[in-house]
Image (cartoon, helix red, strand yellow):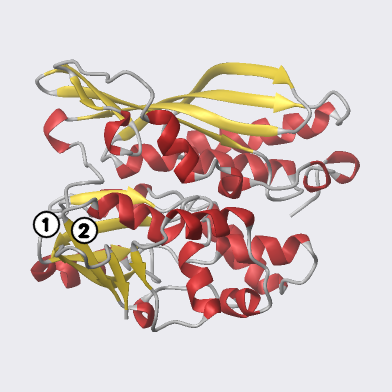
């Protein structure tokens, strides 16, 4: 893996990067409530349910899936940054059950940085879009103080097969396809404290498309899907269960990157991880965990895995299918009806 031309300088220019740069979920939720409701017969999914992408029905047999995602860099290598950002943006289409067909670049770039770095970023993004079987068809760029890159992506799905994040059912099992701890490893790497093997494992995960995982769901009675990104496992899980359902999460079953727990114990935490914790106060029971284990659950993931809810009777079969391409995938918990005032999530 080579550095960007003239030494990169991407990390030096950014205080935070990847999905760790996302806004505070509590602040975002407050702003979204101020927007007027958006309803139309063909708007199958809007922003009201915090889903991963919008879905608009074109005909009884065809709908478009639309999403946008961009962020500052989390690595110095421009080409690698482009690949990670594109993989992350495409993930929302896969989480909704769609097939990406078209992508547009979103670019913010400082005049002070070498333009050759931008060329590397764009090349990495284009490579990933094409690997997904989609086409890069343009975009928009502006000068900015901080470099940022991502994509607006359009996909296709049958209207009846669009997957939602808030459709869990009582008795469902939960499967996670990628390990946790990306934010902690990147934080340690930024301070030159991460082992190269740990860092490389995170890189390999962040550049792995969720395409095969999404395809593996076909033929199974999946009820709900989301991808785990900046709000961490607990934040995205809380969105899935809403107010009507609860989850018993088994910490020992969680796939976790090697080294991530050690870095958490050494306080390589992220600012968004703390904001995620604050946002979920009173919604989760973590009394069985130590502080490092708690940090894993709040840690923001960049280009994380799919979180899948389906009947428990089908979970082992689906897991075996997923592990062909995602060997770390695991069954991590079970959904039940929530009984107030019990917390939404209990970690065992």
Percent position of residue 193, x then y:
77, 72
Task: Look at 49% across and 53% down and name the residue there.
Answer: 208
179 above or below 64? below
Q: Which residue is mark 1?
A: 169
Q: Is residue 321 above or below residue 100?
A: below
> Is label 1 or label 2 in front?
1
- CB-based contact (under 8 Å), mark 1 and mark 2: yes
- For label 2, the residue is 309
Q: Which residue: 56% across, 47% down?
A: 19
Judge left or right: residue 245 versus residue 31.
left
The extreme front residue here reads 341
Mark closest to the chain's N terminus, 1 or 2: 1
> Are there few (<14), some (14-19), or many (20+) residues within 10 Å of tag 1?
many
Q: Does residue 56 sit above or below 71 in this rendering?
A: above
Label 1 residue SS: loop
Q: Position of residue 67 (x, y in %)?
A: 40, 29
Near-viewer residue (265 or 66): 265
């Amino acid at each position: 893996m080579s550095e960007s031309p003239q030494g990169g300088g991407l990390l030096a220019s950014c205080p935070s990067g990847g999905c760790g740069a996302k806004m505070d979920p509590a602040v975002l939720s407050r702003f979204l409530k101020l927007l007027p409701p958006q309803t139309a017969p063909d708007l199958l999914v809007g922003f009201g349910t915090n889903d991963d992408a919008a879905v608009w029905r074109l005909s009884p047999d065809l709908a478009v899936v639309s999403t946008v995602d961009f962020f500052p860099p989390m690595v110095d290598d421009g080409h690698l940054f482009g690949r990670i950002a594109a993989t992350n943006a495409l993930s929302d289409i896969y989480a909704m059950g769609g097939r990406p067909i078209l992508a547009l670049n979103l670019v913010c770039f400082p005049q002070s940085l070498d333009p050759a770095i931008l060329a590397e970023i764009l090349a990495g993004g284009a490579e990933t879009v094409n690997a997904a079987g989609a086409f890069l068809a343009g975009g928009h760029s502006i000068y900015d103080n901080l470099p940022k890159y991502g994509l607006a992506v359009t996909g296709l799905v049958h209207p009846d097969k669009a997957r939602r994040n808030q459709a869990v059912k009582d008795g469902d099992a939960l499967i996670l396809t990628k390990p946790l701890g990306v934010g902690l490893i990147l934080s340690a790497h930024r301070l030159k404290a991460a082992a190269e093997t740990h860092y490389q494992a995170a890189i390999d995960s962040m550049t792995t498309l969720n395409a095969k995982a999404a395809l593996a769901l076909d033929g199974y009675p999946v009820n709900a899907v989301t991808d785990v990104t900046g709000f961490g496992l607990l934040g995205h899980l809380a969105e899935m269960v809403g107010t009507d359902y609860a989850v018993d999460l088994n910490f020992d079953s969680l796939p976790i990157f090697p080294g991530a727990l050690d870095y958490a114990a050494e306080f390589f935490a992220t600012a968004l991880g703390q904001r995620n914790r604050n946002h979920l106060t009173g919604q989760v029971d973590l009394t069985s965990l130590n502080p490092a284990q708690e940090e894993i659950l709040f840690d923001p993931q960049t280009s994380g895995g799919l979180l899948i809810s389906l009947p428990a009777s089908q979970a082992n079969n689906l897991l075996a299918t997923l592990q062909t391409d995602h060997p770390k995938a695991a069954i991590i918990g079970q959904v039940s009806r929530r009984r107030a005032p019990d917390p939404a999530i209990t970690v065992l």
